[in-house]
Image: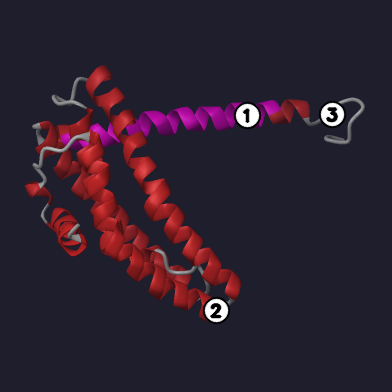
């Protein structure tokens, strides 16, 4: 297992997304992500862990847990879930995509490479001035990831740049509207219940 080579390949994918034309199955895409994440993950654990423990033991433990949970649990799951969402909207509903879900998963996997490239900065403890520095790098990584996702969609799905932008923009808008409606409905429902209360309980006045 060439961890350094896989990490370099991941960084190259983030720096030159137009070259992201590799044919990978869903399993291969996730496997590539895990291999590429080992080296930056270890570096982040060491640097951010030390910074966290210098601040306080709890910050150190939180930093380590966040890195492990994010890099090796949340992000891989996110790749699969995002790929399924994009494939549903962009292939089944809108007809934007031409290829199967493995191509979509490969593109969403490459879009996470900026996180790996700046992992030790992305997972800085959220304390004092570090919070602002972390926010800045979070914005940079977010924009970088969208650019990589757009170009990767274009290359993997063999579509135009405009369609590649719509491929992530339309699902984002639709899901945003759905979540907003759900929140409003819940807010109105709670507002309607709160003056009445629940008899025989102390949950509401």
Q: Secondary structure at mark 1?
A: helix
The disc, 1 or 3, on the residue closer to the chain's N-terminal end is 1
Q: On the rendered image, what quadrant is the C terminus found in?
A: top right
Q: Which residue is mark 3?
A: 197
Residue 168 picture quarter: top left
Spatial CA span between label 2 and label 1: 40 Å
Instruction: Please give the range of residues in magenta.
Output: 164-189
Tell me: residue 153, above or below residue 38: above
In the image, residue 169 lies at what x, y percent?
28, 35
Q: Residue at x 10, y 55 (%)?
A: 16
Q: Secondary structure at mark 3?
A: loop
In the image, residue 125 lies at what x, y percent?
48, 69
Q: Which residue is mark 2?
A: 55
Q: On the rendered image, what quadrant is the N terminus found in?
A: bottom left
Q: Residue at x 16, y 42 (%)?
A: 152
The furthest residue to the bottom: 54
Q: Secondary structure at mark 2?
A: helix
Q: Which residue is mark 1?
A: 186
């Amino acid at each position: 297992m060439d961890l350094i080579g896989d990490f370099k390949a991941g960084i190259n994918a983030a720096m030159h997304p137009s070259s992201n034309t590799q044919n990978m199955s869903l399993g291969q895409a996730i496997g590539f992500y895990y291999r590429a994440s080992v080296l930056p993950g270890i570096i982040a654990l060491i640097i951010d862990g030390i910074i966290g423990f210098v601040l306080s033991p709890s910050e150190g433990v939180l930093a380590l847990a966040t890195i492990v949970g994010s890099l090796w649990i949340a992000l891989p799951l996110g790749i699969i879930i995002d790929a399924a969402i994009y494939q549903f909207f962009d292939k089944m509903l809108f007809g934007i995509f031409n290829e199967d879900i493995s191509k979509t998963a490969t593109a969403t996997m490459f879009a996470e490479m900026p996180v790996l490239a700046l992992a030790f900065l992305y997972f800085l403890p959220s304390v004092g001035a570090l919070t602002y520095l972390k926010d800045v790098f979070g914005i940079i990584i977010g924009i970088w990831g969208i650019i990589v996702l757009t170009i990767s969609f274009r290359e993997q799905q063999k579509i135009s740049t405009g369609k590649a932008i719509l491929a992530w923009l339309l699902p984002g808008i639709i899901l945003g509207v759905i979540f907003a409606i759900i929140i409003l409905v819940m807010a109105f429902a709670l507002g309607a219940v709160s003056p009445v209360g629940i008899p025989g309980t102390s949950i509401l006045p």
